[in-house]
Image (cartoon, rainbow, N blue to C red):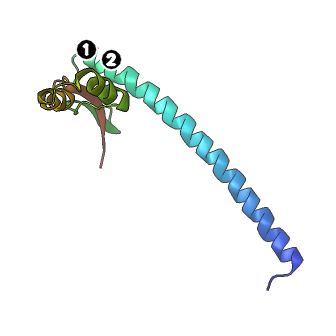
Amino acid sequence: MADQQEIKQMIKKYINIDDEMSMLNKQVKDLKKQKTNLEEDIKNYMTNHDIAQVDIGEGSLKLSVKTKTTQKKVSKDTVMDVLLNNIDDHDKVDDIVEVLFEEDEEPEEITKLERKKKK
């Protein structure tokens, strides 16, 4: 069992480590924000100038455009509105389900930067 002095030292060390981790987490958050802003600027530049890849000697950045289709999300309010407006006719229930789950959402294009490190 540790004596009081050892416990105090452990608690101080614990607090110092916790404070340092908080500071580092804040720095990481700030760096991520800066990186996101730079990424948007780089993607816009590369897109506007029809540049697919840039090699700067320390590695390269490749611009890739991907298309992604997602299923329409249905909220509770939407379901309630549809059911309340169409509950009289049971044949319409099939129509309701079809309307709720039809895939009419347009594909979403996602532009990403892919970094390739120089070996």
Disc ID at residue 20: none
Around disc 1, counting alpha carbons within 10 Å, would you say few (fewer than 14), some (14 to 19), or many (20 or more)? few
Disc ID at residue 45: 2
Helix, strand or loop status at disc 1? loop
Farthest residue to the right: give it. Answer: 4
Task: Indicate the amino acid at tag 2.
Answer: Tyr
- Which residue is drawn at the image coordinates 43% and 26% (left, top)? 38
- Foreground pick, 86 / 73: 86
Name the quadrant containing residue 57: top left
Left-right relation of 92 to 112: left
Mark 1–mark 2 CB contact (< 8 Å): yes
- Where 54 sits versus 46, above or below? below
- Which residue is drawn at the image coordinates 32% and 17% (left, top)? 45
- Which residue is drawn at the image coordinates 75% and 58% (left, top)? 15
- Foreground pick, 99 / 44: 99
Q: Position of residue 54 (x, y in %)?
A: 27, 29
Farthest residue to the top: give it. Answer: 48
> For the residues marked 1 and 2, what is the alpha-carbon distance in whole angstroms?
6 Å
Residue underneath mark 1: 49
Left-right relation of 17 to 115: right
Q: Position of residue 3 (x, y in %)?
A: 86, 81
Q: Which quadrant of the rendered structure holds the N terminus?
A: bottom right
Left-right relation of 88 to 41: left
